[in-house]
Amino acid sequence: MADKRIRYGSNTVVVIALIIGILVLVNYLSSRRFVRFDLTEDKRYTVTKATKNVIKNLDDIVTITAYFSTEPAEANRIRRDVKDVLDEYDAFSQKLKIKFIDPSEFDDTQKQELRFKGIPEMPMNVLQRDKVVIANVYRALSIGYSGKEEVLPDVRSASNLEYELTSTILKVTTKEAKTIGFLTGHQEFDINAPTQELQFLRELLDISGKGQYNLSSVDLKAGEPVDTSVTTLVVAGPKQTLSEREKYEIDQFIMRGGRSIFLIDPVSLQLQTLQATPLSTGLNDMLEHYGVKLGNNIVADLRFHDSAHVQQGSVRFVRPYPYFVKIVKNNFSTENAVTSQLESLTLPWTSSLEVLTKEGVIGTALAKTSEFGQSSQGFHSLMPGTPIPNIDTQVYTVAAALEGKFKSFYAGKEIPPVESAVEDGDETENTSSQEEKTDERTTITDSAETQIIVVGSSQFLTQINRNSVDFLLNSLDWLTLGETLIGIRSYTITDRPLRDVSGLEKNFIKYFCMIGIPLLVVLIGLIRYLLRRRVKRLVAAYGSDILRTL
């Protein structure tokens, strides 16, 4: 009997040990192989492959501290949404340390310390007793790595949190930021100009603000090569012709593997009269050699376009303007990450492009007009309401990307001399030294693998809206960083305006919700009551007969 108890007891211990072992094994495997379901339409709680790659490749601990108020309910809702996203991050990396803090209970000294770190209380509209009141809440994220710290001071929702968070993680973990250079000297858009729209773009790009890059100005008039620190060169709307030596330096920058984006305006405009004058930048032949031919025209789209504000006397009104070409989702390239998830983009006064076949180069039309595109050339007025000269319609390409190995435009040619600066009829003193440097140069004839983007307009830089900004940032990220961040940003881009409804429809929906639905509930209850009453009468009248048949 004792032996039997010992044997049964041993079997019980073995079974318990096996069960514990199986649970441990299942827990271990589930921590590495698991399935998560995100039922939101935009998958806002599912991180992209790009984010997974970033957080899996972290070489040290990244600390994410979430400072969120739990009251009022609206603030707590944002906190829950952010926590869902951070839980997804935590599931894919062992190098993330995430903690939540509610600073509402901090004393004045602790709150002052948070303000010093760039985490203030933020005003928030809260509905209380049918009134909108202002509540001060905390909704910030702090990201720390190896003594560096970056703050997202005002996280309003989880809709675009992945891009902001992943880009900030990249920012604090990147050892050396890459540099974007902007060509100057030809009345281009100057990223350092104190205008509102360019100030906004600079803050988005500059690493000292929200961005990922160092920004620099590139002046090639002295005949010096583009600085080796520059990864991507932006030529944004030159209004003057570039010299051959400047084109040579751009060509050699590309031959060294540098990336470039050319935003080329086809015409010069008098903004008061909107008289269009053909504009020559001198870049047409070089870009055609690489694989994109500029149309030297103005494109209009009779189907998809934005509106323009028109002033007549003291009256200001809005009217359709076909020269503000609007690219819609179906007319973007789905093969390139720059445009694969964009919803729309407006290009004012743009030129058409033609993607040419070049050996070793892959050309992609990034954006096209609808089949109702038209073009015109020469001197003419672009005032709203002015008839478009050309009546033929077709699809026009307005933005293109080239990637591959390029042949130098100056292969087999002499290096162009530097245009000497002349003062009072005498050449400047450094002419001889410039010639000596030119003699020492050797033209690179074949490029490394690189990319070029060409757009038939630079005027979209002045259109401060989400789609124009996203297109520019996508382009620069694709050129400078590859596809690390693009999938994240495009992931949340959407443009779904509400359909306009008439006053009759609005009133019908309003009163149906207020009166119709309650009446419907009452009607269903009344029908159910009458049916049950009838059944009782039938049972009372024929119940005995029914029992006899059973």
Image (cartoon, rainbow, N blue to C red):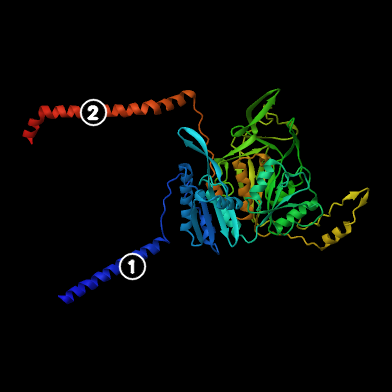
Q: Is residue 549 above or below residue 316?
A: below
Q: Which residue bears the numbered disc 1?
A: 21
Nearer to me, 303 or 269: 269
Percent coordinates x, y for residue 189 in the rendering: 72, 44
How many numbered tags mark residues here?
2
Q: Is residue 521 left or right of residue 501?
A: left
Nearer to me, 336 or 128: 128
Q: Which residue bears the numbered disc 2?
A: 529
Which residue is at the far front?
A: 108
* Quarter where residue 35 is shown: bottom left
Residue 222 in view (yes/no): yes
Q: Circle 1 — which element?
A: helix
Cα separation between marks 1 and 2? 58 Å
Which residue is at the far bottom?
A: 3
Which amino acid does the dot numbered 2 rest on? Tyr
Q: Circle 2 — which element?
A: helix
Percent coordinates x, y for residue 308 in the rendering: 65, 31
